[in-house]
Amino acid sequence: MSIRSGSGENGARLETARERAAEVLLGSQLEEIVELVVTSPEPDTYEARSADGAVSFRRSPVRTGWTFETIATTGRNPLGIQDPSSFSPLREEMRSLRPARDANSYPFAFEHVAQVFDHPCAPDLLVVHSAAHCYGGNIGQHGSMDAVQARAPLVVAGAGVRKLGTLERHCRLIDVAPTILALLGVETAPGNGANGAERDDVFLSRQDGEPLLDLVQPGGAQHVVAILLDGCNPNVLYDMAGSGEAQNVARLMSMGSAFAHGAMASLPTVTLANHTSLLTGCHPGHHGILHNAWYDRSLDCEVVTESPATWQEAMRWMRPGIETVHEALKRSRPSSVSVSVNEAADRGADYSTFELFREGKADLLVPDMSVLPPHTTRPFAETDDKYGWWSFADTVALTQFSAIWEGSHLGVDYPRPDFSWVSFSLTDSASHAGGPHSAIAEAAVRDTDGRIGELIDAVERSGAFEEAAFVLVSDHGMEQSDPEVVGDWDEALRGAGIDFKDESSGFLYVTA
């Protein structure tokens, strides 16, 4: 249910302020940067408005999920196109760079809008940037629910995986966690489904997604290695794999099944919200990590989860009744071993990079930074500080993974892990810097592909390659914005006398 702030006379003033804010946001002066404004005026009722139309819809429970019904449409339905195959493959994306609002596609739009407002700290207005909007100094953008910004790559390969090649298919990121547990042979148990109703066939205690069981062969895998390429555009990745520029990704694709139209991230399509969705099988509005930052009305404070100071503590905001893959595996098989490398959504892992941070032992991971690590494109590392930094960070992630798979890391002996999660971040940083179709973004894919090759080599050296499945995924997509389309809405809102908080550039909290 939606959580609204205020009632009675105060509630009426707040509603007036929200309506005034929406009018400003949808005015002609902001039309170039505002795609949509989304609200939930009543529990289980939602409205999406654009400059040229609006749609309202309601949600109703059905079995363990939801059904959606359109209430009214005025002008053009701004959520009328929800085709997950839009702008895929790469040639189709390049033909329609920065699609206009009347041509854009929002896969699973009703579901993705509704889940945000299930969180008690949901905003009063959710502002969706236009595809062209270049904000925060980044040419590559994500955060919107449009197909390009939401679409992540998905490759499932190796032991226990059907070898089906590249399929003209799509899924959701929330489907990945239950699929991993199915591959590991975890049995289903009673729990809660997408609408909170009890089910007797879930892999996680609260499960919004569904396992991709048609990809899983009987017997599954003894080990699952999940590799996340943060902020990686799948059209670019698949094209580079096909051309031989990402040979290790191509190898994984040849070993199993890839989804041509990707896995759709939940709204907002940002890092920590969807990392947590990947590892819990739940939408952000349900697992609790709502955004990179939001406003907590009950505490009257800003919550920041994605920063160097807060990443390691972010999981404390996870809501009750949510379970990670690590925890679900341990519940099913108490003797299992799982590892979480360079990943904030680490609860329940036997080894975690961020646990070292929490224990004040991060210095044990500091590399020699006087020499560039392998698989680093020198011209970009020498001219872009972030490129160099994330190259080192990803190398440290690879070093941790390899040591654990070799049997010992930081003086602790490890058996071969049942489940390993490794997050690589360079692809996101480089794509932000130049956009997903830039030379720097392509270099990041090549460099990361080299690290994936070394990761696979570590599994092969362990002798467990034939028993291991691999899952290659991202947390969201990445879209090429227009550097000429800049600006924000804060000045216009203030000029209209509206008092508000704008969290993470799009979550607006309005006060009377």
Image (cartoon, helix red, strand yellow):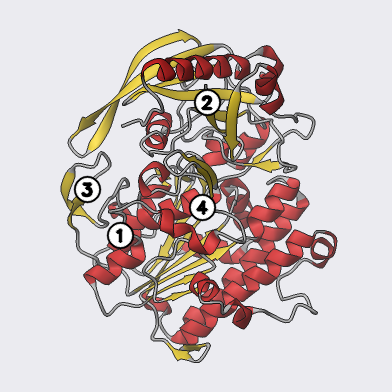
Residue 511 badge: 2
Residue 302 in the image: x percent, y percent?
Answer: 54, 45
Q: What amino acid is found at the position of numbered circle 2 in the picture?
A: Thr
| Distance from the alpha carbon under mark 4 to that under mark 2 | 27 Å
Q: Is residue 243 visible?
A: no
Mark 1, residues whose alpha carbon is within 10 Å: few (<14), some, or many (≥20)? many
Task: Give percent across and percent down for residue 388.
Answer: 75, 66
Numbered disc in front, either 1 or 2: 2
Rendering quarter of residue 1: top left
What residue type is disc 3 on? Asn
Judge left or right: residue 277 versus residue 397. left
Q: Residues within 10 Å of mark 2 (few under 14, many from 20)?
A: some
- Confirm or deny contact between disc 1 and disc 4 (CB under 8 A): no
Please say if 320 is above or below 219.
above
Query: What numbered label is drawn on residue 216?
Result: 1
Left or right of 174 in this view: 133: right
- Label 3, on which residue? 192
* Discs 1, 2 touching: Cβ within 8 Å: no
Q: Are marks 1 and 3 in contact (CB under 8 Å)?
A: no
| Residue at point 60%, 16% (across, down) | 26
Q: Residue 180 appears at what percent x and percent y?
A: 35, 61
Sequence-wise first label, 1 or 3: 3
Q: Earlier in the sequence, mark 4 or mark 3?
A: 3
Residue at figure coordinates x 38%, y 11% from the top left: 72
Could you say which disc has been placed on residue 272 in the image? 4
Q: Reading the chain from its start, which is encountered first: label 1 or label 2? A: 1
